[in-house]
Amino acid sequence: MTTIEKAQSPGGTTARPPRPTTVNRRPRGRGWRNTAWVLFFLLPSAIPLTIFTFVPMVASFWVSLHKWNLISPAKWVGFANYRKLIADPQTVKIFLHTLAYIAGYLPLVYIGGLTLAIALNKKMAGRSFFRAAIFLPVVTSWVVVALVWQWLLNPSNGLVDEVLGFLHLPQPGWWTDPSWAIPSVILASAWKDLGFVMVILLAGLQSIPTDLYEAAEVDGATGWQRFRRITFPLLSPSTFFVVVISLINGFQVFDQVFVMTGGGPEGSSQVVVGQIYNLTFRYGRAGDASALSWMLFIVILLITAIQLRGQKRWVTHV
């Protein structure tokens, strides 16, 4: 027979054994029910996302592996379409045109939007009116904006060349000149998107604590020093968002090019999405067009991934 001795406390009394810790365990069925409810409420957005985004993506990849003219049955060719596009000098040319557009569009729209945001962040008469007026082109149709700018930049009777002639300045051929076709599209695009960039940066400016400016002013910091040391670093989250969105939109530029120049003159303004459209509906090469669209998707994905990876180094949060 085994004898169990009770533990004695220093006072001689018998110490009570510690109570077992009670662990509240959630029933297994409850977790599955919560997951089912979450999926149920996601269905209204998940169903159209699947039908109109994921399914077309899978279908376009399937088409990219075939030779298909939209009429006759598709013929399997594997990755031949990708190899053909990579070896085609026209592919390099249209990507360079797209990069040239981005190189001119992104700095112009960011610097212009930042200037407007700083100006309209100050107290002034009619501030709300100016904000609304600058944002108005953002909600305007691209076709309307492109047609207006096509008329403004018309070398024959356009308003811009009339003003330049009155000032005795050179009058470019704009969208009729191969050297000025891309700059013409850049001007129209930047004018339309200035309001969007202004609103994003204006929201970023208003989130910066005013105490920092007051402390810097007490220390004798100039306006430029306050901008360089406070405004610009703390505006980096908004800047990051604008740069990412603008780059994605820049690689997908199409509407304004299609209306203003049609990719001309002499193919000088043809961009990637415009080439995808031509390959599909003008030349009946749906397989090549789908392969080119996937090449564009990979380029955008890689550039966005690099930006997301590098944001920790230069994005400063308040």
Image (tube, rainbow, N blue to C red):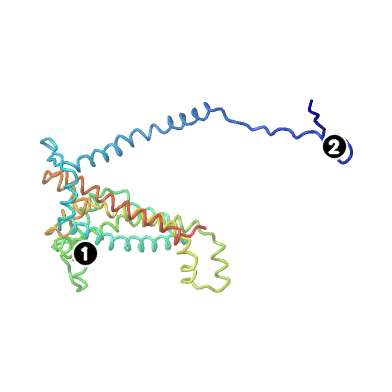
Q: With respect to residue 211, does 225 lie above or below?
A: below
Q: Nearer the viewer, residue 137 or 99?
A: 99
Residue that badge 2 annotates: 8
Image coordinates of residue 35 in percent, x first then y, are 47, 31
Most distant residue in the front direction: 1
Image coordinates of residue 311 in percent, x first then y, are 43, 58
Return the mark for residue 160: 1
Q: Nearer the viewer, residue 46 or 105?
A: 46
Mark toward the viewer: 2 or 1: 2
Q: Name the residue at 57% across, 67% down.
A: 215
Q: With respect to residue 25, does 215 lie above or below?
A: below
Please tell me whether mark 1 sits on a helix, a strand or a loop.
helix
Q: Name the residue at 31% across, 63% down.
A: 108
Is 212 displayed left or right of 284 in the figure?
Answer: right
Q: Nearer the viewer, residue 296 or 200?
A: 296
Q: Name the residue at 55% across, 70% down.
A: 217
Residue type at numbered disc 2: Gln
Image coordinates of residue 222 in percent, x first then y, are 50, 73
Labelled pair 2, 1 in contact (Cβ < 8 Å): no
Please tell me whether mark 2 sits on a helix, a strand or a loop.
loop
Is 247 displayed left or right of 273 in the figure?
Answer: right
Q: With respect to residue 4, does 271 lie above or below?
A: below
Q: Where on the picture, by quarter, is residue 13?
A: top right
How many residues crowd mark 1 within 10 Å: few (<14), some (14–19), many (20+)? Answer: some
Is 77 displayed left or right of 209 in the figure?
Answer: left
Residue 130 shows in this picture: no
Most distant residue in the right direction: 12
Residue 19 shows in this picture: yes
Specify which label sits upstream in the sequence, 2 or 1. Answer: 2
Q: Name the residue at 29% across, 58% down.
A: 191
